[in-house]
Amino acid sequence: IVPDLSVEVYINESSKITTLKVPALKESNEINQENAAQGNPLANIERPSDTSAIIRWAPTPEEQKQLNSEGVKGQLVVRYDVDRESHPQQILVNEGYFVHFFAPTNLSTLNKHVTFVLDVSASMLGTKIEQLRVAMTTILSDLRPGDFFSIIIFSTYVEVWNPEHNRRQEIDHYYYRGNKGRITQQESLRSSVVPVTPDNIRIAKEFVGRLQVGSTTNIYGALLKALDVVRLGRNLTSSNDVLYRSPEPMIIFLTDGQPNVEERDPIVITNTVTASNKNASAAIFCLAFGDDADLDFLKKLSLRNSGFARKIYQASDAALQLHDFYRQVASPLLTDVSFNYTESQVEEGTVSKTHFNTLFLGSEFVVAGKLKSTELTGGLTARSPNGTTSLPFGPDIIVICPPFPPTVEPTEEHNVTNASFMERLWAYLTIQQLLEKDEVKSPPKVNTTSPNKKRALELALKV
């Protein structure tokens, strides 16, 4: 129990705050819908203006005991969003720094070809395989007309679902030993690239409802087979129409273990899959189900293949976690997104990441850097359902920020200037991306004196 416990959160936005919630304390990694819906009665919310808010949470010792006799345990979460429709992109400028927010609305969704690669090894026996069945049934319902999908399951062998017979095709264990076999197998996979129709979704649900566990974990074979299916999907869905956009390929790979069949070295698997993916260009998203999966390996694999990895906690809500992850990547809006700023207006080498693989519905891109002047112009290029899109930006979206916070008098320890916030956000993005580069390029046991880590440490200590 803490005698004097107090948390103060100051929010000051350039756009109108549309939603603001402080849910009940989050006490576990589970997605608790009931807690999310409940408010936090001990949180005091003030709204000095449409664009600002102050949240104070200061439970007395007695109130802390009521929450937990041993003291408060959990996460205090503040959720809010702003009016994105009025300001789909903004560039905030202050004291030589800029932060560019890009979250467009009213964009059409790109069609996609999603290949589900699912671990059904012996360790999935019991609750996990049942949760996978439930999650996949829900996810299949979320697929949209115009999308394509494929299902691959693996344990010792790699098997591809064939909707024509509503069964799986077992892949010869020696298939990966030669190119001649690869061509033959690709021909046999033609029916595995499945358009989304009510009948196909119904048949797929029947298939996942019957999933049974096998034995060992052939991660290497499963990923290479998935890339074969992706390449086949590109060929089958291509068109001579210059206005036609092939579905965006993505692989959603789930495993609860580590490779123990064929190639077992994570570094070799990562390098081989990445090289094989160059002509497939699929984003690979990895899910580490439980504590036995090698999350570091899956993170590296995803980062090198335009995706990201997440841990799915082995809990009663695992099916909900899986579905929640899928919803994050279910609606691609733009791909191959590049921000270009006038070189004479920004300091060389200070701008954070400017190229992004995919913008998904509900997500946002943030770019930060140092300015040479108060002016900033440039443009954005991306691929959309209508082809290549160009969007110039200039003074009309630039906001010169006032001191922060303009409407409150914070205590001395909270007297943070807006300039320091801008610099810290720039430093945060830069540090995050330096560490990401280090993770992508370095072997599992990274040298702590690597240039990227040294630069990240310097920034962290300076700002």
Image (tube, rainbow, N blue to C red):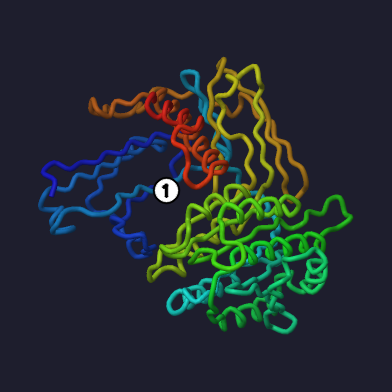
In terms of depth relative to the viewer, which is nearer, 389 or 342?
Answer: 342
Kind of residue at badge 1 = Thr
Give residue 404's position: percent from left, percent from top: 37, 26
Query: What residue is rendered at 39% in x and 48% in y?
Result: 79
Residue at figure coordinates x 40%, y 28% from the top left: 421
Depth order, front residue of 69/38:
69
Q: Is residue 246 above or below residue 201?
A: above
Percent position of residue 5, x then y: 17, 43
The x and y percentages for residue 178 are: 78, 65
Residue 424 location, quadrant:
top left
Rendering quarter of residue 456: top left
Please state which of residues 27 and 103 is positioned toward the viewer in this rendering. Answer: 27
Quadrant of the drawing holding the C terminus: top left
Q: Position of residue 235 (x, y in %)?
A: 82, 61
Quarter of the view holding residue 165: bottom right
| Side (left or right) of 67 relative to 91 | left
Q: In this view, does 319 lie above or below 373?
A: below
Residue that extends furthest to the right in the rendered view of this protein? 240
Task: State left or right for residue 43 relative to residue 315.
Answer: left
Q: Total marks drawn?
A: 1
- Within 10 Å of the Cα at label 1, are there few (<14), some (14-19), or many (20+) other Cα atoms? few
Q: Is mark 1 on a helix, strand or loop?
A: strand
Residue 211 vertical position relative to residue 300 in the rendered view, above or below: below
Q: Is residue 385 visible?
A: yes
- At horizontal 66% and vertical 51% (from top left) the residue drawn is 274
Which one is nearer the viewer's eye here, 446 or 228?
A: 446
Which residue corresponds to the image point at 33% horizontal and 26% vertical from the top-left? 416
Tag 1 residue: 19
